[in-house]
């Protein structure tokens, strides 16, 4: 693999592997707890799950008074304060698993929105790609963009769900190549669901309330499966224990060799077009429209100018969470789903500018929401469009 095709992040970014030691409660934004309600598990979870666990571990390891820090009376050199975050930024948060042959960790990625997997009975899965197309003038759509992603097929087929891209497939995708069946892994080989029954409590007696049973879904990872993270602007311990997800379930932080695939930025700059793929939920003003993108599709970002001509945006999510410092829910914000894909033409940018933009994320300068940036939202990757 070329130097441009891989990032090792040796200077400013620290990579670690998080291995759960228990089932995890990875909750989304749906309320539950009433009689008969059901608490779904969110896979992949929001990056704030990892950011919160890592920052709490850093504070505990440095002997910081957590109550004083939450109140803003103490500032950490890397984490800042809850109101004014410091240099800590979660740059990568992906499902991952240990390779059987050694200590290396393989990243696992959600299937980009422009790829479709089909499978006939016991045959190997096949992958097809959506292509931006000019529709016939008689076909009306609600898309404001000139091209529409279309899947051209000779016959009908039904999408097969539950598939993820292995690191080998993600690398091919970023290079503009089509992943193969060997580059896929199914969720059943990564985790299983574990249903847990909960009992509502009577607030006055602090005892079980009659008739208030609810179900919460936990995620039980297979052996060797966890999360790969990369953090910039802060030092992480080589080995540490973490409280992860809802109920603070046990996990272990490991030092591991993690290689992060990246495209050839020089080739993308020379081609003048590419695909932009969200690697975490995107909190954008108009729900799906990229920051710096005008009504005509013109996109202007630091060091980059391009035209957005098509988009395949996954179902929107509502991002929230619990603010431990303020003891209240975080504001709910609509977000474009991870793995959403945008096609860019008329691209004008240097390879260096493209690399810096990816490292910064889809945020303005100065950043309009430093807290959400630190938590790992609005992250993306650039992929060749061949």
Image (spheres, grey):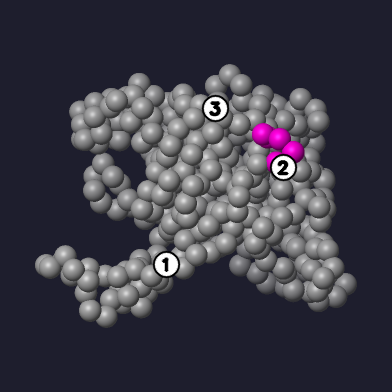
Task: List the residue tagged with mark 2.
Answer: 100
Pinpoint residue 194: horizontal percent, then vertical percent.
50, 65
**Element type at mark 3:** strand
**Element type at mark 1:** strand
Pinpoint residue 132: horizontal percent, then vertical percent.
75, 57
**Element type at mark 2:** loop
Is tag 1's residue or tag 2's residue first in the polypeptide sequence?
2
Is tag 2's residue or tag 3's residue first in the polypeptide sequence?
3
Task: List the residue tagged with mark 3.
Answer: 14
Q: Residue at x 29, y 53 (%)?
A: 329
Determine crowd level at label 1: few under 14, some 14-19, many 20+ residues with C-alpha closer than 10 A: few
Whether residue 102 is situated above or below residue 64 in the rendered picture: below
Q: Residue at x 16, y 65 (%)?
A: 206
Pinpoint residue 199: horizontal percent, then vertical percent.
30, 70
Q: Residue at x 41, y 49 (%)?
A: 249
Cα–Cα span, label 2 and label 3: 23 Å
Task: List the residue tagged with mark 1.
Answer: 196
């Amino acid at each position: 693999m070329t130097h441009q095709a891989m990032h090792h992040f040796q200077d400013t970014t620290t990579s670690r592997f998080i291995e759960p030691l228990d089932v995890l409660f990875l909750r989304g934004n749906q309320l539950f707890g009433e009689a008969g309600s059901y608490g779904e598990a969110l896979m992949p979870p929001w990056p704030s799950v990892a950011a919160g666990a890592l920052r709490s571990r850093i504070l505990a390891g440095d002997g910081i008074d957590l109550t004083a820090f939450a109140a803003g009376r103490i500032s950490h050199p890397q984490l800042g304060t809850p109101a004014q975050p410091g240099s800590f930024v979660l740059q990568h948060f992906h499902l991952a698993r240990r390779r059987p042959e050694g200590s290396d960790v393989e990243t696992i990625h959600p299937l980009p929105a422009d790829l479709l997997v089909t499978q006939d009975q016991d045959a190997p899965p096949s992958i097809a790609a959506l292509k931006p197309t000019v529709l016939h003038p008689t076909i009306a759509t609600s898309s404001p963009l000139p091209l529409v992603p279309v899947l051209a097929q000779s016959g009908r087929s039904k999408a097969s769900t539950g598939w993820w891209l292995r690191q080998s497939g993600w690398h091919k995708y970023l290079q503009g190549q089509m992943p193969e069946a060997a580059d896929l892994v199914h969720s059943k080989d990564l985790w299983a669901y574990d249903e847990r029954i909960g009992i509502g409590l009577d607030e006055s007696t602090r005892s079980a309330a009659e008739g208030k049973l609810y179900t919460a879904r936990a995620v039980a990872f297979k052996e060797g499966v966890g999360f790969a993270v990369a953090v910039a602007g802060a030092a992480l311990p080589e080995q540490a224990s973490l409280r992860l997800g809802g109920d603070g379930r046990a996990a272990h932080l490991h030092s591991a060799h993690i290689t992060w695939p990246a495209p050839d930025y020089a080739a993308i700059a020379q081609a003048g077009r590419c695909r932009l793929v969200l690697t975490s939920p995107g909190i954008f003003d108009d729900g799906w429209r990229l920051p710096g993108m005008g009504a005509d599709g013109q996109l202007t970002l630091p060091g980059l100018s391009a035209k957005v001509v098509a988009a395949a945006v996954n179902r929107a999510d509502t991002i929230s969470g619990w603010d431990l410092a303020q003891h209240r829910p975080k504001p709910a914000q609509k977000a474009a789903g991870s793995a959403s894909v945008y096609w860019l033409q008329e691209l004008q940018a240097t390879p260096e500018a493209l690399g810096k933009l990816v490292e910064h994320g889809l945020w303005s300068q100065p950043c309009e929401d430093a807290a959400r940036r630190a938590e790992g939202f609005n992250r993306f990757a650039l992929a060749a469009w061949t």
